[in-house]
Amino acid sequence: MSIAGQVIRCKAAVAWEAGKPLFVKEIEVAPPQKNEVRVKIHFTSLCHTDVYFWEAKGQNPLFPRILGHEAGGVVESVGKGVIDVQPGDHVLPIFTGECKECPHCLSEASNMCDLLRINTERGGMLHDGHTRFSKDGKPIYHFLGTSTFSKYTVVHVGQVAKINPEAPLDKVCVLSCEMSTGFGATVNVAKPKKGGFVAVFGLGAVGLAAAEGARVCEASRIIGIDLNPNRSEEDRFILIDIYIKHSKIAKKFGCTEFVNLKDHNKPVQELIAEMTGGGVDCSIECTGSTQAMVSAFECVHDGWGVAVLVGVPSRDDSFKTHPIHFLNERTLRGTFFGNYKPRSDIPGVVEKYMKKELELDKFITHSVPLLDINKAFEYMLRGEGLRCMIRMDASGTTWINSTTLFYLPFTPYVE
Ligand code: NAD
Ligand code: ZN
């Protein structure tokens, strides 16, 4: 029986207050309006951006809100004016859109759509400013236009990528955000040549996705750089260090060498120049640290080196580098969502996964049913693993991907 045009009652994980556990409750989801699509979410994963807005530090808090922006689902119904997708289509909702009409969408170079570019402040839908979610008549705000921590969500049609229905949604959903960001930064912007040398600063999910991009481009040396800010992180990176040098498992992440900043007293750009005979061909910065941004720029080879900034800096940050580095023919670039246009390009990235040209499974380290969504937040806050998959329909238990167990700290967390 079709439920199109009706209000749906379904379970959603609602953030009622900053930093407090989410409540999984039954809510109401209104039908899609003009240029909107209602999507049944099958899988969603947790990203740092969700945690950042849940903590609401240094921003205007907007609660109650349904977070979530990395997901895969199936279109349930569509609003007026929607012709690109229809009920039954498999889609990835994406936090930044593509209207296909503005100067950015019409330019081959840009993915910064005027209409649907990421907007973290907006809590309602673009069409009328209202929310489609409520609980007992009280509105619940949207997040990034996606709000995927709900079994049903309403999204602007410009923010859904229609993908191959054969693609496993529990894997390709990670292409909605960080995986495409890091991978695209390498393959679309840095563009290393076969046999080239690449440096990746910051080995979180984005940096490891950038390393995966370098592996796919057949770079011959991929140098991963990170630091150990605290004890549990130190354990984690000692493990990465050991594994990146010695283990077949970590080699899957593409890095051929690992530099732990804490092991060296000299600036990392000098170290990399020594290691590579003058610098790498390209570097990708995935930290948000301005110090790493400067190092990433200054460690590329003069004459041809390209550095790409991906990390998001703090509001008042600035950095300093000597202009001679530009005169010596180094290039500095930045990118948003890996330079991908969500509707036009992401279906093709899904195809790369289907053809086994791109690996995603290794990024998924945990899985929980929707009822246990707060566990996913705990894993991320403790720095455990990379991606925790949240299963919207399944009951079942929590599992940890045994091939990526090395990513856990030495000491198990004790409640
Ligand atoms: P993460 O916190 O999991 O990983 C960042 C890593 O950088 C950590 O391992 C940390 O130890 C390391 N690091 C910090 N300072 C460093 C330094 N000076 N040198 C070397 N390593 C350092 O984060 P993530 O989820 O992988 O995201 C990485 C960055 O990408 C964040 O800033 C995030 O906001 C940004 N991001 C950008 C876009 C975009 O479109 N441009 C999209 C998503 C995320
Ligand atoms: Zn546009």
Image (cartoon, rainbow, N blue to C red):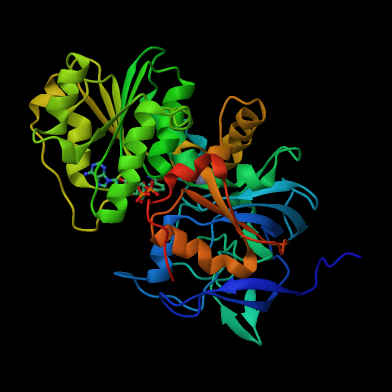
Residue nearest the observer in this picture, 313 or 46: 46
Q: Is residue 220 above or below residue 269?
A: above
Residue nearest the observer in this picture, 177 or 121: 177
Give the residue displayed 42% in from the left and 62% down from the top. 413
Give the residue displayed 44% in from the left and 42% down from the top. 406
Q: Is residue 330 left or right of residue 55?
A: left
Quadrant for the C terminus, please: bottom left
| x and y percentages locating residue 227 in the rendered image | 24, 43
| x and y percentages locating residue 82 in the rendered image | 72, 53
| x and y percentages locating residue 335 in the rendered image | 37, 39
Q: Is residue 230 above or below residue 250?
A: below
Is residue 336 among what the camera can see? no
Instruction: Name the image quarter holding residue 4.
Output: bottom right
Quadrant for the N terminus, please: bottom right
Q: Is residue 48 left or right of residue 359?
A: left
Query: What is the total number of numbered labels drawn onto the structure image?
Result: 0
| x and y percentages locating residue 153 in the rendered image | 66, 64
Q: Is residue 134 above or below residue 149?
A: below
Give the residue displayed 35% in from the left and 47% down from the top. 236
Q: Furthest-right residue in view?
A: 1
Give the residue displayed 39% in from the left and 15% down from the top. 193
Q: Is residue 374 left or right of residue 51?
A: right
Is residue 252 among what the camera can see? yes
Residue nearest the observer in this picture, 39 or 364: 364
Q: Is residue 243 left or right of residue 31?
A: left
